[in-house]
Image (spheres, rainbow, N blue to C red):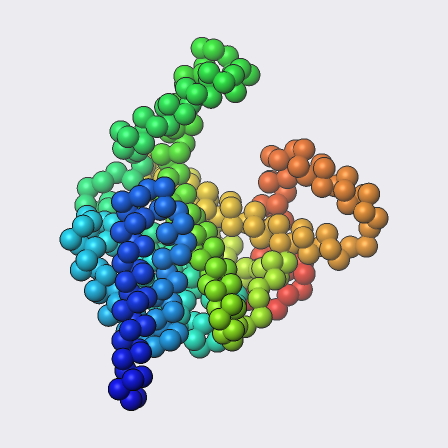
Amino acid sequence: MTTNEKAKALAEWAFFALIFAVAGLAGFYQPVLEFFVAMLLPLPIMLIVLKLDARYAILGLAAAGLLFFVFMPPAAVFILVFRYGLLGVLFGLLFKNRISSSKILSAGMAFAGVAALSYMALSYLAGNNLFVMGEEMRSAFEQAMAAYRDAGMLNNVPAELQESFSDGIISTYELLFPGQYIISAAALAAVTYFLARACLSRMNYFLAPGLSFTMISLPWYSIWGPIAGLGLTLAGDNFSWLLVAKVGKNILYMLFWLYIVLGLSVAAYFFRRINVAWPLKLIFLVFVFAYPPFSMAGLVLLGLTDSLVNFRRLAPPA
């Protein structure tokens, strides 16, 4: 590498590392930007990997991490560096090695989920109760429920039961918060993946063929997920193991949304393949949207069954 090439590489490293650091600080100090920053934050690190290599990316994360420690609490630094920064490294390595789109997306979502789970585990070991909202968040929920009552959205609930109904919603949110946190992390990683593809496409970077939504599938052994969740829930309830029961319910909650997505994929596949007149398809869609509880239950059942039966006769996922 010539002197000019070294200088160019150093300038690119400094530029993208600075973007990562500034964006991280902006997201921390300006909550209104937090969601957008979270989606975009892995991209500068990913570009360092693609333009240089992973060693430069790790060095950039270390430099940004030292800066974060000056202005942020350790928990925020962990999220920025390990959850978003290392996700950028992972995406960069996978895109650089021309891995298939399905594997990149799956790996990114799995990493984000594991990173979120690791953060919650460390928080639990530090003495924080994951199933209890802080006073500020609880106050915000109570104000939101009061606004719903004032707007007449709880008129179908008897007046004497509205308060207990509101408390039940808050309690349910507290119970399922860990699962919701992991789902949100995985979904955010998926959004980042699609943004990364769009960014690399604009740069004319080589990209593997995109992932087709109707080809999403799970291997047969994924059935052990709902079995484990149901087993932990029943064992926890029967033997009064509160933590075990809560873990099982969160597993079932996460799998509920996963199987809804898989069910949608299967339904969309056959919706396109079956040769039926469009008026009949339109009536079917109206029924689906008119009865959400039945539709969601049907999608979950369809997704769960497809992982065992493979209705579409797809090749087993890697």
How many numbered marks, from 0 up? 0
Image location (x, y in percent) of residue 206? 51, 75
- Residue 126 against residue 89 in the figure, above or below: above
Q: Is 151 in front, or is 83?
A: 151
Q: Residue shown at 62%/35% (left/top)?
A: 292
Instruction: Say if residue 187 shows up in the picture.
Output: yes
Instruction: Say if residue 318 shows up in the picture.
Output: no
Residue that sits furthest to the left in the current view: 70
Q: Is 97 in front, or is 37?
A: 37
Residue that sits furthest to the top in the current view: 160
Image location (x, y in percent) of residue 39? 41, 54
Q: Residue shown at 37%/27% (left/top)?
A: 141
Q: Residue shown at 67%/52% (left/top)?
A: 268
Image location (x, y in percent) of residue 153? 52, 20
Q: Is 61 in front, or is 110?
A: 61
- Residue 238 against residue 189 in the figure, above or below: above
124 sits to left or right of 245: left
Residue 235 lies in quadrant:
top left
Residue that sits furthest to the front in the current view: 4
User: Quick one: quadrant of the N terminus?
Assistant: bottom left
Q: Is 232 in front, or is 157?
A: 157
